[in-house]
Image (cartoon, rainbow, N blue to C red):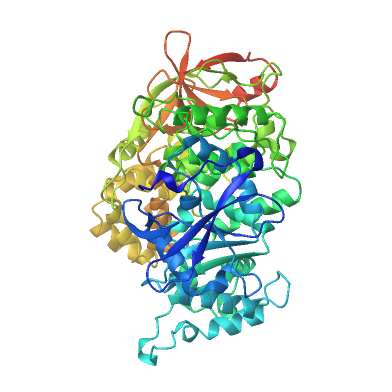
Amino acid sequence: MEMSISLYQPLDTSRREIRLVRILPSNDTIRCTLQVESLSSDLKYAALSYAWGDPKVTRDIIVNDEKFPATENLYEALLQFLSNTALLSNDGDTALPLWIDAICINQKDVNEKNHQVQLMGSIYSSATRVLSWLGVPGVERGDITIRTMRDMVEAAFSGETDQVDEAGLRDFLTSQPQSLRPPDESEEDLPDEGAMWRDIRFLFERPYWTRVWIVQEMVLAENADTHLFVCGSETIPFDAMEKTAKAFDFLVRHEDPQRVGLKQRDWHLTRHFGSPFIGIQIVSYIRQSRASGDLFSTGEIPFHIMRLQATDKKDLVYGFHAITSSDLTVDYHKTTKQVYIDWYEMTLRQLSSVSTKDGRPATHPILFAGLGLDNASKSGLPSWLPNLGRLSDIFRDTYIRRLWDYNARMGRVDGSNSSAGSTSSSVRQRQSLDTPTIISGNTMQISGVRCCGIITEVIEVEKSSDTSRWPRSLHKLCVDTLNRKLKDHPLGISTLQALFYLMHGGQDPMTGKHLNVPPDPDLGFHVFRCFGCVDRVLDVLVSIENVVDLDAIGQLRAKSRSDKSLQFALDANMCKGVEKPDNLDIVLLTIKHFGGLQAALALHKSLDPSQEKAIFQTDDGYMGIGPKGLRKGDQPCFLKDLASPVLIRDNGDGKCSNVGLAYIYGLLESKATGKIKEDVVEAERFEIV
């Protein structure tokens, strides 16, 4: 974005000066003036929150009689404010000047940018009015969606209460889709069922919601007299947006959707496309935490940037600067790596002093790092330092999200989190585990304990392009367990059972029941081992759908090409000390009992997160899942402040690399962690590069 340097005169940082834009009346080109003001409690202005858009696609506006290239999205916002000056007024009369980062900050002056970004917290928290510009209505009918959301809130909430009025919400929903019809549409043009949820989803898929700065801007806007979301000419206040999110959550949790007026397709869309309000919910959570005195720690930043993007990757840290309990100094002169290290060191200092709302410590940042998540040779970052710029891509990985969530839920692994329950308290490392430190730009020291042996077997699970087949490597692994090619598990169960528990995180995917140790395999395991030992799952699944009674099974045996493999799997001695099905009949009826084809497909689908990962076994017999790229000789370790083991690779020079997080079934219940708890195992100091 090119602009005239003469447009900007130096600001007096001692007076906390900022620039404000005033839009002038005009019938053609958008014309503005820039005025310099000292940021004080008496200053009245509006602050704009928006997505820049493509900086290469611009339209000229006039600022102080000079041409200024505004991005398309900013141009549309200014055009709307020009035609509807009431958006900039709190009293319906005087239009407030605007603070707009792209215009008010000299983007070519790094020193000024440092100073203004450092002031960002004060700029948004001191604004009289904050306007979140979502864009023009577009083909997604954003303006109609805004009106619909306002109507829903008016119907579902009485007065100032935050409680959903079920009767009011039912009346509103039963009026759909008529309430979605634009005034100029005929009855024949009415949207189909589910249009409301579709349009809401489209509204929250706009670029605004992926911008890293929006979280901070919306959190700080709680101090403004007015915070409005604007789409075209339609607006909705933040509190109404919050209530819409609560109504959505109420519907998702409701046991009887028809009682609240939801049609079947509406219900399906409501339950399955996921909450579109995640951005609003995050902001509400942070606001509530701040109100109760619970500081937002820098260690929580990765959890919030997983869905966000930034053109300048330094903004993934600086974009939260004003709402965290940090004293980081904004400095765009630094490299991205140095900004990440500054964030890392700040988070390490907070580990021992800052707790989250429920008493957990701040999350250790190594949780988000590893050679398996980011190729260090390409990024230039050490293996302990997360590549924050890639977290939004990594977030799509279901298995990694499970591990992140598990560590966030369980807290630290040295037993200091009494609220975490027996799982985390069962792993108590020696008191000698001191605070991790960064001893150079590329090396971090951290205490930990090696556990459960060295990795001796690695099976990389490829991505299967054929949904009717398991990945061949996973199929081969299941067959190998039948032939006793892998060591039995230390908990006294077969390797195939351990694999089943491992793939599903210790929970039966068909019943949702926790799989106890010693194990008591539920019906889901019988289905798992049945599928695991045949090459083509679809042959079995299509046949299963037609099984209604025992008489039909005879016909199934005659036509199933997989029958011999199935019978082999069932007759093999796969489970030690547990009763196995007598024959194929029981397995097939089991699948039928849990919903037939759809349930079996769901079980098959539940294995997807393991694809493009590595399944491993240690010389002690433990099985686990880790990132792709791990090697024989890597070793699981418990590091300070993590609830899951990390895979460490010795580099041969006294230093090691972090490969990434792993899940190892049965480890927390084993004798290995009992030795750690009893201080039998000595902690050591790792130097990770």
Q: Residue 218, position in %: x, y? A: 59, 56
Q: Is residue 435 left or right of residue 637?
A: right
Which residue is at 53% across, 53% downward? 214
- Furthest toward the right, the residue is 292
Which residue is at 37% across, 29% downward? 379
Q: Residue 470, position in %: x, y? A: 31, 45
Q: Is residue 76 left or right of residue 99?
A: left
Q: Closer to the camera, 319 or 281?
A: 319
Q: Closer to the camera, 332 or 379?
A: 332
Q: Closer to the camera, 650 or 290?
A: 290
Up/down of 159 relative to 296, above or below:
below
Q: Residue 406, position in %: x, y? A: 57, 40
- Furthest toward the bottom, the residue is 187
Q: Can residue 371 be seen by looking at this rendering?
A: yes
Up/down of 267 relative to 625, above or below:
below
Q: Closer to the camera, 133 or 630?
A: 133
Q: Can residue 197 be seen by looking at this rendering?
A: no
Which quadrant would residue 98 be assigned to in this image?
Answer: bottom right
Q: Is residue 95 left or right of residue 26?
A: right
Q: Residue 557, position in %: x, y? A: 28, 57
| Count of number-bearing discs | 0
Up/down of 467 relative to 532, above or below:
below
